[in-house]
Image: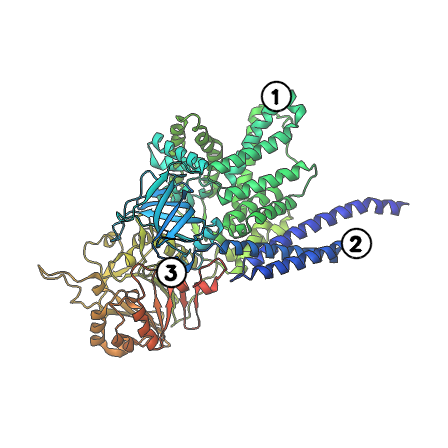
Amino acid sequence: MGAGGVHGHDRPASRLTYAGTALAGVLLAWLGGLVLQLQQPALWSAALYGGIASAAFILVGLAWRARSHGWPALLAAMLAVGAVGFSWAGWRAGLRLADGLPTALEGQNLMVTGVVASLPQVSASGSRFLFRVDSAQWRGQPVQLPPLLALGWYRNWQDDTPLDDPRAELRAGQRWQLPVRLKRPHGAMNPGGFDQELWLFEQGVRANGYVRATPATPARQLEEAAGFALQRLRQSVRDAIFERVPDPRAAGVLAALSVGDQGAIEREDWELFRASGIAHLVSISGLHVTMFAWLAGTLIGVAWRRSARLMLRCPAPWAARWGGVAAAAGYALLSGWGVPSQRTVWMLLTAAALCSMGTRWPWLLVLLATAAVVTVIDPWALLQVGFWLSFVAVALLMSSAPGAAPSPSAPAGRWHPAIAGAARALREGVRTQAIATLGLAPLTLVFFQQLSLVGFVANLVAIPLVTLVITPLALLGLLLPPLWQLDAWVVQALAGLLGWLVALPGAVWTVPQAPAWAQAAGLLAGALLLLPLPWRWRLLAMPLALPLLWPAVPQPPHGRYELLAADVGQGTAVLLRTRSHQLLYDTGPQYSPESNAGDRVLLPLLRLRGTEPLDLLMLSHSDTDHVGGAASLLAHWPVSALSSSLPPGHALLAKGVQHTPCQAGQQWQWDGVRFTVLHPSAQALQPPPPGTKPPKPNALSCVLRVEDAAGHSVLLTGDAEAAQEALMLAAGGNASLHSELMLVPHHGSRTSSTPAFLDAVAPRLAIVQAGYRSRFGHPAPDVMARYAERGIAVVRSDRCGAFLWSADESACQRDLARRYWHFTE
């Protein structure tokens, strides 16, 4: 009887354990199927995805019939659900890719009619906005375009085309007829760099371009309010904030927190927020939406309990829970309904539904269920850093929650209850922040290769200040605008504190990118440290974390070098590394008054590959597509020496770095690798006689030849033209020029790459650094024909992305990281 009683009690528990395990397995299988599909370099046909899904449903039916078989049936169900997830993501991706821009319409003059679908992002160079297409014409005939375009309306910044300035009255919801030029989404591809093509794909933007309004083809506003009422409201709020708040930096933060306009925050402030570790607080993220739901739910619950009639109609916990979700959805809509906000709303909605079922779900199942709901709606959320940071943060707080919190009615001892309650709240706040800081540190190093060491203190102050004071006041300012000025003073005080923290020595810890095994070990270390495990297991955290905190950076062997030609668009930037030295040849272009290749490409790339200073920065000449990123680089990265042909008095020579003009005949060796400057001559660098026109910057391009101990050589040519090629041929002949690799002179312009020069260099491989659909026509087809005639293979950065070369291997970043949403010819 006793034995039977034991089994009778165990069976329900066993069934419950199996049910929980089965549900967790099925949810993990769904996520696993999505992850597998997101690795596809190219999509399969819709029919194949449909066939896989159909076979999966048949397998589910067989598993259901065999449910009494236990674990085999569960494994079959997991396989089937994973296949359904795989097919779902593939089918959704196929629908999105089908909206692409026809290749024949790239670069053509189109007339598009539609509605401004977002807040225009205004900067010194113009405006950027989303545009919903109603109709389009090409040469007077209707054409089909993607439904959503990302457009820029720019001023004449470094452009000879007489374009009209962007209209000051451009506003969300207006209907316009715009002359535009479009291209398919194409972004830079560098190791560890931002994937702009993925970002556009997830937003549903399948073409981008610019307004090309001229006196002959003007832009015409057709209607003031043609739709997007919510966007119009957001823009009116943003405009009102900037009118009421004199300090534009504080106004930008308030606009970002109230209506989600992150572009209103100035670049210097973003740098401050990133260095102090609070960047997540000033962009509309899951934290803001969740805190808003909590605050709204708390207030609704308090008010609900004061009404007996309301309590009889609906329990207060239900009202607070669903009222908080509704408030969070409203805030997410007001802030622009961005992808992070959407994810959070779906998460809150799922969690509220699970709680309302009247059962207690384990925290892991709650997270898995919410992740499944989010990825059904947005399969590509799994590729977003914010998704993982949000889920891991919640998982850490849930898994490390104390088993028994002190009762609010418990005796407070010798302290007043209010003081005791405040002390408990402070202790819990410190504990929560410590868990979040320690637990997210490995993930932050994996994603960003840097960690704010002052972030714990900064967040301890900023989280309650931003979530409980600054954000609520920014929203209350909609009703009482004078509150915005009070809020601005709080923002200014917070910025002052953050500036002081960031100025402390060692405020930011930066590491190179660790190998995959070290990243996995570091993430495991974070979990071991914070999960409620015995201390003998927690002690393993430190040795597991060391490879992530101090990763070993692979270096070329003595006598060898590595070359990385970065993808910077229309410009040049080449990083050379020997065993213990680094040289950067040019720094890419300045894209706009607010953006350059130094900030966007080179600094992230240098952090990814190592923390050593640059031993030499060589700037070939003064054109902005070669030195556009230099000022940012010199301001944020240690540079030991500078070599250039910059004219005396150039602003970059006043940056405090020791400068030596590059001059033919200069030679040095690093780690068994020889560096030789071939151009310009000492005479060419002399100031021209009075009344004589100075040479063009291209004529003074520093030309550098690098050769390793095994004879592998590369020739970096800058923008040298035919006359300079002839001078180098006359000065040194073929022997001094012959190289295995060559950077194509002047990006493949017709002014360079003369037949005699190509015959002298005789490279096996040539590298062209040029922008996609370059407005200069680089590289010129007839120039490329000369290379083809000589059997010289050509690698183009617009098709290859960053090009990595060593004596043992070479690769294009686009090939290494190819996914189906990336650009293809």
Q: Nearer the viewer, mark 2 or mark 1?
A: 2
Q: Taking 738 as reference, is 389 above or below it?
A: above
Return the disc, 2 or 1, that comes first in the chain's sequence. 2
Return the disc, 1 or 3, that comes first in the chain's sequence. 1
Three-letter amino acid code at the position of disc 3 = Asp
Question: Which mark identifies residue 68?
Answer: 2
Q: Taking 794 as reference, is 366 above or below it?
A: above
The residue carrying pointer 2 sits among few (fewer than 14), some (14 to 19) or many (20 or more) residues within 10 Å by Cα, namely few
The residues bearing labels 2 and 1 have C-alpha atoms spaced at a distance of 51 Å
Return the residue nearer the eye: 548 or 721.
721
- CB under 8 Å between callouts 2 and 1? no
Tally the numbered discs: 3
Return the residue nearer the eye: 44 or 422.
44
Say which residue label 3 marks: 567
Q: Taking 740 as reference, is 524 above or below it?
A: above
The residues bearing labels 1 and 3 have C-alpha atoms spaced at a distance of 63 Å
Residue 176 coordinates in the image, percent (x, y): 37, 43
**Quarter placement of the C terminus:** bottom left
Q: Is residue 401 visible?
A: no
Three-letter amino acid code at the position of disc 2 = Ser
The residues bearing labels 2 and 3 have C-alpha atoms spaced at a distance of 57 Å
The residue carrying pointer 1 sits among few (fewer than 14), some (14 to 19) or many (20 or more) residues within 10 Å by Cα, namely few
Q: Secondary structure at mark 1?
A: loop
The residue carrying pointer 3 sits among few (fewer than 14), some (14 to 19) or many (20 or more) residues within 10 Å by Cα, namely many
Residue 645 coordinates in the image, percent (x, y): 22, 61
Q: Is residue 502 visible?
A: yes
Return the residue nearer the eye: 281 or 480.
480
